[in-house]
Image (cartoon, grey):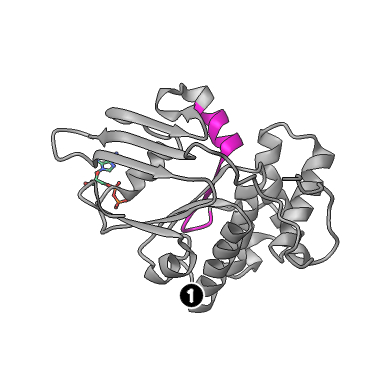
Amino acid sequence: MTPPAETATAGDAPRTATPLASPFMTTPLIEFNDVTKAYGDGPPALDGLTLEVRAGEALAVLGPSGSGKSTLLNLIAGLDRPTRGTVTVDGVRVDQLGEAASALYRRRRIGIVFQFFNLLDDLTVADNVLLPAQLAGMPRKKAVARAGELLAYLGMSRHATAFPGRLSGGERQRVAVARALMNRPSLLLADEPTGALDTASGQEVRKLLTELNRDGQTVLLVTHDLALADTCATRTVELVDGRMVTA
Ligand code: ADP
């Protein structure tokens, strides 16, 4: 696969170029092998979970509150460690990473989209999107070109100099997606990405995530939004009491 040219695009270009990570690999992108996470003496948050996600999939993880979805995301992102079992993402044994290596892993390989966007309100849209590249030490010129390319891809070029407070919820989530994609992550994690949006914006973000996955981005989303799972997911699993009940 030829990597997309890293040039800035003026204006909102049609989504033909795909500034995403390569979806082609032979081993699973995510592998949970008999993973248990217990926080105390009570029942474990995850209980012997085995799960594989292949590159190119869009996996929706459904489940009631307290079923272990956030724990699953935290283990994939290396924000927490399993009590037992192994977590491998993109060839990295995430469960074995120290703090610094874990931060580096997140910066390089994972993009995360949150329910409440987590944008910095005193930075412009462009500066929010540039932030992960700055933290990763990408040369400024290259980073600016990449941010321009992503904002165009997501139809947000005209808002590059706006502050997030001026945008609608759907637009803010687009910016959050652009930021998450900045360092070409192997995996895009989305934690209730439509949870704070009105109907129209939710629909817009469902469409966007579906298109990203069709363009090759591997996506794992945790959601209560059945419409999101129906629209976007190539596969759905359900967690109940830390165990997978459907696949
Ligand atoms: P979900 O995201 O599906 O709501 P969580 O993964 O947040 O579920 O929680 C699963 C279980 O683990 C719940 O019983 C929750 O109370 C418990 N839990 C999660 N995080 C912690 C923590 N940091 N300390 C203690 N218990 C926790």
Secondary element at tag 1: loop
Is there any visible trace of residue 180 in the rendered image?
yes
Furthest-bottom residue in view? 200
Q: Nearer the viewer, residue 13 or 107?
A: 13
| Residue at (42, 65) in percent of width and height | 229
Q: Position of residue 206 (x, y in %)?
A: 52, 68
Residue at 82%, 48% in the rendered image: 5
Q: In terms of image quadrants, where is residue 121? A: bottom right
Give 184 or 40, whichever is nearer the viewer.
Answer: 184
How many residues crowd around disc 1 within 10 Å: few (fewer than 14), some, or many (20 or more)?
A: few
Whether residue 81 appears in this view of the structure is no
Residue type pointed to by label 1: Asp
Counting from the top left corner in percent of width and height, residue 109 is at 57, 37
In the rendered view, would you say 23 is above or below 161? above
Which quadrant would the N terminus be assigned to in this image?
Answer: top right
Looking at the image, residue 25 lies above or below residue 66: above
**Is residue 103 a member of the stretch shown in magenta?**
yes
The residue carrying mark 1 is 198
**Does the magenta-highlighted stretch encompass residue 73?**
no
As drawn, is 152 to the left or to the right of 176?
right
- Ligand 1's image quarter is top left
Please provide the residue range marked out in magenta: 102-117
Residue farthest front in this picture: 26
* Residue 42 drawn at (x, y percent): 14, 38
The picture quadrant where one finds residue 184 is top right
Question: Residue drawn 39% across and 42% down?
Answer: 52
